[in-house]
Amino acid sequence: MMRPLIPRCGSALRAAAMQSRRPLLTNTWQTAAVSAQRSYSIQAKAASDIKQQPLDASKLVVEKTHHQKALKKPEELIFGRNFTDHMLTIEWNAETGWLAPKITPYQNLSLDPATCVFHYAFECFEGMKAYKDAKGQVRLFRPDKNMARFNKSAARIALPTFDSDALTQLISTFTKLESRFIPDARGYSLYLRPTMIGTQKTLGVGPPGSALLYVIASPVGPYYPTGFKAVSLEATDYAVRAWPGGVGDKKLGANYAPCIVPQREAMSRGFQQNLWLFGEEEYVTEVGTMNFFVAIKNKKTGQKELITAPLDGTILEGVTRDSILTLARERLVPEGWKVEERKFTMKEMDEAASEGRLIEAFGAGTAAIVSPVRAISWRGKLVNCGLKEHEESGELTMRVKNWMEGIQYGDEEHEWSYVC
Ligand SMILES: Cc1ncc(COP(=O)(O)O)c(C=O)c1O
């Protein structure tokens, strides 16, 4: 979109007229001459010093729906199927920057079939939740972490970055508006999906000249409605989720679709998820779409160790992962545990299991908080992850879940909990 820079064009015209020693035009010719000059000079300006507008939460415009949706019974909620009444949208373009944020009734997007998101996957997203506390207040959990990761993902695929505090404020306003959708029972929450897409209509491969940031919300029930159910995994080496120098540490939509076929294959063999291995050493990286933790007893010292893979560029920087590490350092280390971010292999886990040193293993992510692991299929054998047959979760996994929920639902006042 061109910005009308009429005064500058006028002076450009005057300068041109002076140079050619001709009088300034004052009739309809003048209009034609101005337009010709204008587009020339505006382009030069746009390329040099037009300052982009930052994301400004105070410019929010709210248009409420006239047709409120009926609330589903909490027990009927299915993850990601039902959405709230409204959505938050913010447009961006390279010339202006961020436009005024809007909350509007939830609606379809209308995009040209040539829009770059459909062809070159200019898309990144976040996953976070809002919880209702005992007083009915709505709380987010560490939204600053999600905003920081969202900005890193966007920057990696040439989408615009934004002011994290401004988006947190907007999400907070949006979430409060939709709070009637959050059942006030433990385990229930409102899943928030901030998303950014490149919207420029072009088949040319290049940085998108325009983008749309939007946030939608879906009420969700507990991941394990009837209590923990331990999962079995297939150690996957024939397909690789992420690699050094790649983008596996960013939350790009393009990382997820290629994982579905390996997951379907694992399921066809009776395993719920893939345990993603990397390299000849078979380093353990992540499980499905979660970070992975294992608790083992050290072979030499017998000390209990909680281990997760380091952030080496192949691991998503999970907010749950970071929270568990922090809480475990505070709460487990005084009990004699060692908490480590380090590379570990499938062989090391197998050895620990066969020597009775593997205490427990779990996945960690916003959706489930923690997901206990029963066994891992690896090289034709089943590596047992420490649970007895009648158990669905280890003691540590259960403790971690309670720590996290205590903060998320505001039972424990904590700086990570953001009251909307
Ligand atoms: C690949 C992957 N790893 C880990 C996680 C866990 O991240 P978080 O704890 O921020 O939900 C996710 C989250 O969806 C993920 O997609």
Image (cartoon, rainbow, N blue to C red):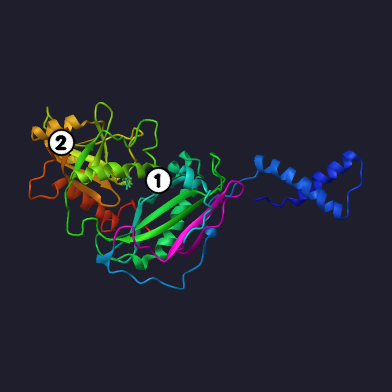
Q: From which residue to which does the magenta span run?
A: 78-107
Q: Residue at x 29, y 46 (%)?
A: 320
Residue 189 visible somewhere in the drawing: yes
Q: Secondary structure at mark 2?
A: strand
Residue 396 % position (x, y) = 16, 46
Q: Which mark is residue 296?
A: 2
The tag earlier along the polypeptide, 2 or 1, is: 1
Q: Can you tell me whether the CB of the residue at mark 2 lies under 8 Å from the nearest atom of ligand 1?
A: no
When asked about the image quadrant of residue 327, the answer is top left
Residue 192 % position (x, y) = 37, 56
Residue in front for this viewpoint, 245 or 49: 245
Residue in front for this viewpoint, 11 or 346: 346
Badge 2: how crowded within 10 Å, few (<14), some, or many (20+)?
many
Q: Residue at x 11, y 44 (%)?
A: 387
Q: Residue at x 82, y 45 (%)?
A: 13
Residue at which label 1 appears: 253
Locate residue 222 relative to residue 105 in the image: left or right.
left
Residue 272 % position (x, y) = 21, 47
Question: Type of residue at label 2?
Answer: Ile
Label pair 2/1, CB-CB below 8 angstroms: no
